[in-house]
Amino acid sequence: MVEQPLVSVIMPVYNSEQFVGKAIQSVQKQTYSNWELVITDDCSKDKTVPYIKQYINKDKRIKLFELKNNSGAAVARNTCLDRATGRFIAFLDSDDLWHAEKLDKQVKFMLAHDFAFTFTGYDFIGHTNKVISVPEKINFQGMLKNTIIGTLTVMIDKRQTGTFYMPLVKRGQDLLTWALLLKKIPYAYGLNESLSSYRVVKGSLSNNKIKAIKRTWHNYYYELQLGFFKTLYYFVFYVFNALKKHYS
């Protein structure tokens, strides 16, 4: 029997006691068993840490690291990435969920085609009919035009991409990371099947559309240094496709 490559699951947490247990359980329920769950707590003020430790006591595949100062999601994710030992890197935030066959299907998809970067479709918790479908593949320019790559669906083969980290920007570091990776590799490939469930949390950063629009302009213009006209070009497509995704 061929040994399963190790998948490192990256999970930043902050004041997550309400949902983190369900997120951890969705990893434990995976039909693919060779994973490690690397969690970094960003100085939670609630019972997140003792709650996670209850899971660690029963499952040694779960690892917890604690930041000394509240530093933001990018630092928390990068702390996880520093300590991840797997060939494959996957991302799951503490309020989202995976379907049981997510890792199994995505690893097989990547190995069968030797893909370095993949993403999948996903659905929304509490919205039974809303499903995000994904294209067969997308390049750097295509990614800038929309928000189709959901962080909770991403898997990276670090053997092909090499070590990578998320930029230390205040917000939108995940989408900026995918853009920077797609400057190095030609395409990210989509597995058009809903394998994850995204939770819309009222008042969350990702749920604030105005802030999302502002941070996207900032990241395109200042971080990726596209220049004014290219930023404007991609930004118009981004806004249109974001509205289409959320309201269609």
Image (tube, rainbow, N blue to C red):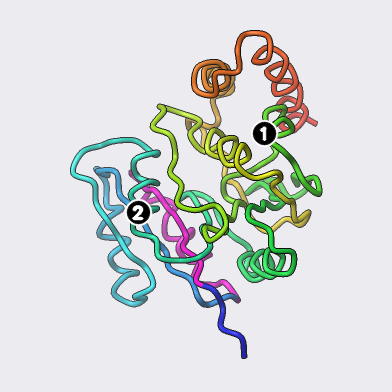
The local secondary structure at tag 1 comes to loop
* Amino acid type indicated by mark 1: Thr
Q: Position of residue 180 (x, y in %)?
A: 56, 36
User: Foreground: 229 or 184?
Assistant: 184
**Residue 92: which numbered mark, if any?**
none
**Residue drawn at the location 42% of the way across and 64% of the way down:** 37
Q: Is residue 57 left or right of residue 20?
A: left
- Which part of the image, by quadrant, shows the C terminus? top right
Query: Residue 192: horizontal and vertical position, in percent?
Result: 78, 54
Q: Position of residue 164 (x, y in %)?
A: 46, 47
Instruction: Classify residue 45 as left or right of residue 226.
Output: left
Q: Residue furthest top?
A: 228
Is residue 116 positioned above or below 245 on the image? below
Q: Does the magenta-highlighted stretch encompass residue 75?
A: no
Q: Residues within 10 Å of mark 2 (few under 14, many from 20)?
A: few
Q: Earlier in the sequence, mark 2 or mark 1?
A: 2
Magenta part of the chain: 6-31
Secondary structure found at label 2: helix
Label 2 belongs to which residue? Answer: 82
Label 1 crowding class (10 Å Cα cut-off): few <14, some 14-19, many 20+?
some
Q: Amino acid at mark 2?
A: Asp
In which quadrant of the rendered image does the N terminus lie?
Answer: bottom right
Query: Closer to the observer: label 2 or label 1?
Result: 2
Disc 1: which residue:
147
How far apart are the two marked residues, 2 and 1, measured between alpha carbons?
A: 26 Å
Q: Is residue 28 visible?
A: yes
